[in-house]
Image: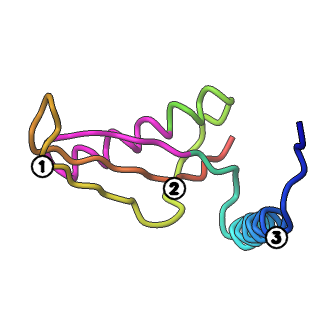
Amino acid sequence: MNLRWGHRAGAGLAAAAGATALVMLVASPATAGPLFCGAGRGLTAQNAIQGALDDAQNSAQSEGFYGTCTLAGEPQIFETFDDPYFGHVFRAQVTVSCLP
């Protein structure tokens, strides 16, 4: 079985790693702690965002970061009209930085 990657896959991975390193370098001074992601669902966009914030804070607390959490970027909101259980529903994703 040949498991060698093509030259295009290597270039793509190198570009992705470089972009990730750049984001971490730029985000580190502005945010005082590590980044945590959270996701939420709700019947309104605000409920979905609040659920995502709670999820991200719970993730931070599970790692021992009980301090203040601040948003690191804009929340991402996705609207679905054909959810099999709720019909019209909003989903949100947030990234927060939390202090110990």
Alpha carbons under labels 3 and 1: distance apart: 38 Å
On residue 29, the disc is: none
Query: Could you classify mark 1 by the number of other residues whose Cα lies within 10 Å: few (under 14), some (14-19), or many (20 or more)?
Result: few
Q: Is the residue 19 above or below the residue 97 in the image? A: below
Q: Quadrant of residue 77?
A: bottom left
Q: Between disc 2 and disc 3, whose residue precedes?
A: 3
Provide the residue designation for mark 3: 11
Q: Could you tell whether 31 is left or right of 21 in the image?
A: left
Q: Is the residue 94 above or below the residue 58 in the image? A: below
Q: Residue at x 59, y 45 (%)?
A: 36
Q: Residue at x 72, y 73 (%)?
A: 26
Which one is in front in this view, the residue at disc 2 or the one at disc 3? 3
Q: Amino acid at mark 3?
A: Ala
Provide the residue designation for mark 2: 70
Provide the residue designation for mark 1: 81
Q: Between disc 1 and disc 2, whose residue precedes?
A: 2
